[in-house]
Amino acid sequence: MLTFLARRLLGLILTLFAVSLVVFLVLEVLPGDVAEVMLGTEAREDTLAALRAQLGLDRPAHVRYFAWIGGLFTGDLGISHTYDVPVAGLIAERLAVTAPLALLAFVLSTLIAVPLGMFAATRRGRAGDYGVMGFAQVGLAIPNFWFAILLILVFAVWLRWLPAGGFPGWDAGPVAGFRALFLPALALALSEAAILARVTRSAVLETMGEDYVRTARAKGLGWRPIMWGHVLRNALIPVTTIMGLQFAFLLAGAVIIENVFTLPGLGRLVLQAIFQRDVIVVKDAVLILAGMVVLVNFAVDMLYAAIDPRPKVEL
């Protein structure tokens, strides 16, 4: 188990290093002038030179890279060119919206998909199975921003149960905050739940055909204890892997959903920073988003190890 943990930690560190290197190379080393991108092609040469000095672009690339990485470890992410505030505080403020949004979408996706997948598997070839698979097909076919528009139309415009957009801030209370995040999270969750329901159905069907399940049934064990005690735990092994991968799609999808619902999240900040040519914010925010995905996948690996009783020697 310790070897398994050490390998996963090493993989996490190497992945973060590779991501940081790619982000740095794309934004600062590849052909092109970052200062000119930020100020525009009409900027004067002395203004460009001053910005290059301010950003440290007059230093060698390897010095800039290690200075940036060192700043990440100390919490000094630089100053936003657009907002003229520390990038660390700006990202922390936006993460307070994006992280709960992604986690709520993740929970909703799991709560929708796992029961539906089990329901479809236990009714294979019957109406319930076809209904769940039809829902999954629709969920796969319709993009999440279209779900967002439909949810706004139904729950905000017609029923007036939930707000159509905006975020009141956590100072207004957790109830108001989660009311504002529920529709965006549901719009994100529906597409991912469609995929997860199909995977859950397949995993449950495969597990139900195993010898130990047939043995448990032959011994007279009830259907519910078999499903929850034997089938579900083993079926969750491949399902857990997909759940970890889906978190990355939830973060990526938040860029669009946050703009549909005008949420002040990290995805919207990245999009605004790209339009405003705020390279410092883009560089830091993209790396933090990638780091969140890597950390979640690491947590999923640990959960996988806890669920799967087999030795981890070859993993």
Image (spheres, rainbow, N blue to C red):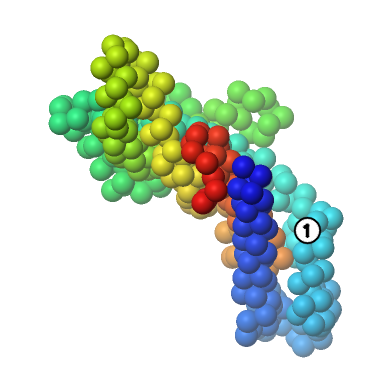
Expressed as whole percent of the image width and height from the top left, the position of residue 315 reads 52, 50
Expressed as whole percent of the image width and height from the top left, the position of residue 113 reads 37, 33
- Point 46% across, 44% down: residue: 241
Taking the image as shown, residue 207 lies to the left or right of residue 36, namely left
Question: Which of 214/136 is in front?
Answer: 214
Above/below status of 300 relative to 55:
above
Q: Is residue 248 visible?
A: no
Expressed as whole percent of the image width and height from the top left, the position of residue 96 reads 67, 40
Q: Amino acid at mark 1?
A: Leu
Quadrant of the image occupied by residue 73? bottom right
Q: Which residue is mark 1?
A: 72
Question: Which of 64/91 is in front?
Answer: 64
Quadrant of the image occupied by residue 68? bottom right
Question: Which of 170/219 is in front?
Answer: 219
Taking the image as shown, residue 29 lies to the left or right of residue 78, namely left
- Point 67% across, 34% down: residue: 169
